[in-house]
Image: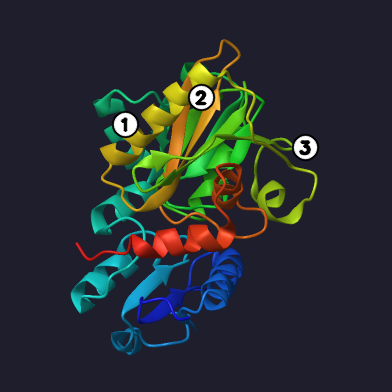
Amino acid sequence: MKRNFGKVAVLLGGKSGEREVSLKSGSAVLAALQRQGVDAHAFDPATHPLHDLESFDRAMISLHGRFGEDGAMQGALELMGIPYTGSGVMASAIGMDKWRTKMIWSAAGVSTPAFELVDADSDFSAIEKRLGLPLFVKPANEGSSIGISKVKEVGGLKAAYELAAKSDPVVIAEQFVGGGEYTVGILGDKALPIVRIVPKNEFYDFEAKYLRDDTEYLCPCGLTPEKEAQIQQEAVQAFNAIGCQGWGRVDFLMDEAGRHYFLEVNTSPGMTDHSLVPMAAKAAGISFDELVIRVLELAHVG
């Protein structure tokens, strides 16, 4: 029996550096929708003109990175009046920008690691001293850990900046927090169970996320129920602080003293076999197919 969503476009692929990941996410989402009788079709904005979307009733966004997760596609869908999944134009744009996300969180009292903007004229030595070593260097507007490096030795910041600047002109240096990596999936207005990520290499980079099979994902995550509930509540607040809606993921770090620091928000999380939101949903008793339907039900305009 066909679900009453009308004709659904699953947006996948796109033009960003995360195209291959998006193709995997979108293919999994498309198959789940079709299994449940939804009239769903793949739509790759890199190969199809956007005006072809006018024949669709809803859009399921499985795009990652620029031109899909950054508010650009959301704006196009708004103009066409097509309900779409995930956050709106403003929240998508802010969520894609790690620098502006962290500024809003800092203003709202959300704990986040110390950071500084870096450019070609920066005093690299002074930044290393202020933030301490090791530290992370990141392009502000990339996902999937593209362009990220860990600076462990004095004098290493300049090369790390130059690598990150190849991906985005806005680059941030961020204080290292070394007590563990975690993520909180958000579905509607509720947080899913927390997942702890234990990479076998230096940090949770592109290889650990998508290419290796030895990265460990722990759910239950090992935190006390009280601590997990506290972080889940704060994660929803962090999600809401930048205006997010529908679904998403908020990543955080723990230090050795048990303090947590929110790292970034992902407004169009991956839906591959290595992805974290489906893992958390499963721990909450929500199957992959049910998760996809629940996300689609939250589609909106405005």
Q: Quadrant of residue 199?
A: top right
Against 224, is 290 above or below? below
Q: Residue at x 50, y 79 (%)?
A: 37
Q: Residue at x 79, y 50 (%)?
A: 213
Against 111, is 182 above or below? below
* Residue 298, position as x, y percentages in the image: 33, 60
Residue 113 visible (yes or no): no
Task: Report the residue that reaches farthest toward the right.
Answer: 214
Say whether disc 2 or disc 1 marks the residue closer to the N-terminus: 1
Q: What residue is pinned by disc 2?
A: 228
Give SS at disc 3. Answer: loop
Q: Nearer the viewer, residue 134 or 234?
A: 234
Give SS at disc 2. Answer: helix
* Residue 297, position as x, y percentages in the image: 36, 63
Amino acid type at circle 3 is Lys
Q: Residue at x 65, y 45 (%)?
A: 205
**Alpha carbons under labels 2 and 1: distance apart:** 20 Å
Q: What residue is pinned by disc 3?
A: 200
Amino acid type at circle 2 is Glu
**Alpha carbons under labels 2 and 3: distance apart:** 24 Å
Say whether disc 3 or disc 1 marks the residue closer to the N-terminus: 1
Instruction: Indicate how the structure is coloured in the image.
Output: rainbow
Residue 105, numbered label? 1
Q: Nearer the viewer, residue 121 or 91?
A: 91
Against 136, is 132 above or below? above
